[in-house]
């Protein structure tokens, strides 16, 4: 077990007898005791989060009266007959007497804003929240309950690590709990962990970090080795904030840092985005099938009306205002270089602009779970027209130059593509369609990106998207630059905004390499056939999303409505399809480009290879 200071972080006890005044150990402010309790034990001056007991945690997170304890397991009290300065059974007895708990975790069924789930909440007061056989059995049992009842699992962690008094049996609990989480992955059941201070050692290196979504409270520390061990090993002082939630967020290890008062709302949003099992899911599938049938009927009616108009010698009525454009002749003539300039307009809506206008209950998830959170790629689950989807997009940063620099001008690092891949795998696990918004000059070309495996990250995404068993819709909303764009665009339906462009190279790059003349940029743009009309003629895109007069930058709200209509139309068509059909037709779509690949296999795998 990692040695952690187990003193409370403020002088307020964990019992109902809170003193009249509490001194925060973060900023030394005096806080009225009852106010401190109302504030969920968060200092109003510095925001320091004090520890909560397991029962306080459940009372805060769950709907009143909804908590129902899971069946207790019989603890294995002293498997090694272990004695240090005191016999292990004495330590257990003292912990039970002091906390009123049988073990260091409390597991219950409950609900958050009416949405059912299973919760396992750890309590640091009980032997430092250490992971022993009892905790392992309770965590695995909570996972099995979640699996049996097909409801999400939330694990709230607080631990110094493995329980040394149970020796190698404690070590085995890491594997036991890891495989319990794997069973939930196989079953497509959402898992969430909430990291609280501290979470170290065997807990950090097992179930705490194996969930689909990892949230952390501000200031919470997480790591395999504790800071004292690291400093003693390397003989150096660690930097300020090392292993804190904020450090972990910046390095791609957690999805978000959420202050305690906001946790219930964030969790409720995440829980609401998982389609319900049973009849509700069947009803949703039937509704999606009906929507697709309605869309097809409308398309057939449009075709019939156009045919009748032609027979009568009249011009076809053309598409209704705002509908997806599927014929190149419906598009105005466009100068390629002008299209490039419009696609790059600094005021053009970003992915987050579109998401803000179109998507309900969106929660951005961060990080590649390896070492970074690339700011040039954003993503997370949300509701588009009431339908749960995973939104992923390049993000240039908008009109502000400093923000564009911070966002790397929309040019992702390898971590950005790996973050996107992680979110796509989560969507596949949950049976959620994927929507990608492409707007990038290309992948980040810097030396750090190359050291991080840029080519490999792009290649892995191309393969992953060809295997994803859920609908994928891509819209090139601005620039589609080379492999950096394609890495988010291997989709069932690929659309482009009316002023979007998509190319193997920028016009500037093409002119420099082939013309060797910067004045040839407009000619290169024309030769590359990169604007919407040409992309439609080439079959690269399946449709063109109209834009407001003057371009998307002139009216963000209207541009978002037009984009939303196009996305809904595509999803209405694709959602009823079985995974086998999605994979088969997606692969056939890309096999047709250039010289068509012969002898396509008739059967395709229906599972994502994880």
Image (cartoon, rainbow, N blue to C red):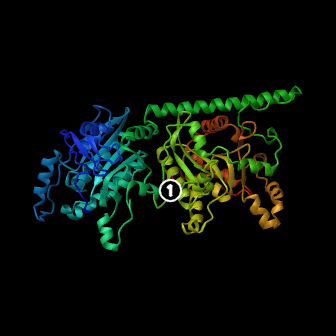
Can residue 313 be seen from the camera position used here?
A: yes
Outermost residue toward the top in this view: 312
Percent coordinates x, y for residue 496 in the rendering: 70, 45
Q: Residues within 10 Å of mark 1 (few under 14, many from 20)?
A: many
Exactly how many numbered labels are in the figure?
Answer: 1
Q: Is residue 15 left or right of residue 192?
A: left
Percent coordinates x, y for residue 122 in the rendering: 27, 49
- Between 226 and 87, the one nearer to me in the picture: 226
Percent coordinates x, y for residue 227 in the rendering: 32, 64
Query: Within the image, what quadrant is residue 131 found in?
Result: bottom left
What residue is at 42 percent from the left and 57 percent from the top?
248
- Between 484 and 99, the one nearer to me in the picture: 99
Percent coordinates x, y for residue 471 in the rendering: 58, 44
- Between 139 and 270, the one nearer to me in the picture: 270
Of the 4 image quadrants, the one containing the N terminus is bottom left
What residue is at 32 percent from the left and 44 percent from the top?
43
- Does residue 439 sit above or below 238 in this rendering? above
Q: Secondary structure at mark 1?
A: loop
Can residue 472 be seen from the camera position used here?
A: no
Q: Is residue 164 left or right of residue 291?
A: left
Q: Circle 1 is placed at which residue position? A: 373
Outermost residue toward the front in this view: 29
């Amino acid at each position: 077990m990692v040695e952690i200071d187990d003193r409370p972080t403020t002088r307020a006890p964990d019992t109902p007898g809170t003193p009249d005044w509490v001194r925060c150990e973060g900023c030394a402010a005096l806080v009225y005791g009852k106010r401190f309790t109302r504030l969920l034990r968060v200092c109003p001056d510095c925001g320091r989060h004090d520890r909560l007991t397991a029962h306080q945690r459940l009372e805060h997170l769950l709907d009143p009266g909804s908590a129902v304890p899971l069946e207790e397991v019989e603890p294995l009290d002293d498997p090694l007959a272990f004695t240090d300065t005191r016999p292990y059974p004495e330590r257990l007895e003292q912990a039970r007497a002091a906390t009123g708990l049988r073990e260091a975790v409390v597991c219950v069924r409950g609900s958050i804003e009416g949405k059912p789930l299973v919760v396992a909440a750890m309590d640091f007061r009980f032997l430092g929240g250490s992971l022993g056989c009892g905790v392992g059995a309770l965590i695995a049992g909570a996972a099995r309950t979640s699996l049996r009842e097909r409801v999400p699992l939330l694990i709230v962690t607080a631990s110094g690590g493995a329980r040394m008094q149970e020796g190698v049996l404690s070590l085995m609990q890491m594997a036991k709990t890891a495989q319990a989480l794997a069973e939930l992955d196989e079953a497509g059941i959402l898992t969430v962990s909430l990291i609280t201070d501290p979470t170290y050692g065997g807990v950090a290196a097992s179930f705490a970090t194996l969930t689909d979504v990892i949230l952390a409270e501000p200031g919470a520390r997480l790591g395999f080795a504790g800071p004292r061990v690291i400093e003693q090993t390397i003989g150096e002082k660690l930097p300020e904030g090392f292993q804190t939630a904020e450090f972990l967020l910046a390095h791609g290890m957690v999805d978000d840092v959420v202050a305690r008062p906001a946790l219930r709302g964030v969790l409720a949003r995440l829980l609401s985005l998982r389609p319900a099992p049973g009849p509700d899911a069947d009803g949703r599938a039937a509704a999606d099938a009906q929507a697709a049938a309605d869309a097809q009927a409308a398309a057939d009616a449009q075709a019939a009306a156009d045919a009748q108009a032609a027979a009568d010698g009249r011009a076809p009525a053309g598409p209704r205002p705002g509908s997806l454009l599927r014929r190149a002749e419906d598009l105005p003539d466009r100068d390629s270089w002008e299209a490039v300039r419009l696609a790059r307009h600094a005021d053009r809506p970003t992915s987050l602009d579109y998401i803000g206008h179109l998507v309900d209950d969106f929660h951005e998830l961060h990080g590649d779970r390896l070492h970074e959170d690339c700011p040039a790629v954003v993503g997370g689950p949300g509701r588009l027209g009431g339908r749960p989807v995973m939104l992923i997009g390049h993000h240039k940063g908008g009109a502000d130059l400093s923000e564009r620099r911070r966002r790397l001008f929309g040019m992702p690092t390898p971590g950005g593509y790996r973050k996107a891949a992680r979110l796509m795998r989560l969507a596949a696990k949950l049976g959620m369609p994927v929507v990608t918004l492409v707007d990038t000059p290309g992948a980040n070309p810097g030396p750090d990106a190359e050291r991080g495996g840029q080519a490999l990250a792009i290649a892995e995404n191309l393969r992953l998207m060809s295997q994803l068993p859920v609908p994928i819709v891509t819209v090139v909303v601005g620039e589609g630059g080379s492999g950096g764009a394609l890495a988010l665009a291997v989709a069932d339906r690929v659309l482009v905004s009316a002023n979007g462009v998509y190319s193997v190279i920028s016009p500037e790059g093409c002119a420099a390499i082939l013309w060797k003349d910067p004045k040839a940029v407009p000619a290169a743009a024309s030769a590359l056939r990169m604007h919407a009309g040409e992309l439609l003629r080439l079959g690269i895109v399946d449709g063109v999303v109209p834009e407001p007069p003057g371009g998307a930058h002139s009216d963000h709200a209207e541009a978002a409505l037009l984009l939303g209509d196009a996305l809904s139309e595509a999803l209405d068509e694709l959602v009823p399809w079985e995974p086998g059909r999605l994979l088969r037709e997606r692969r056939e779509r890309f096999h047709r480009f250039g010289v068509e690949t012969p002898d396509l296999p008739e059967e395709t795998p229906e599972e994502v290879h994880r």
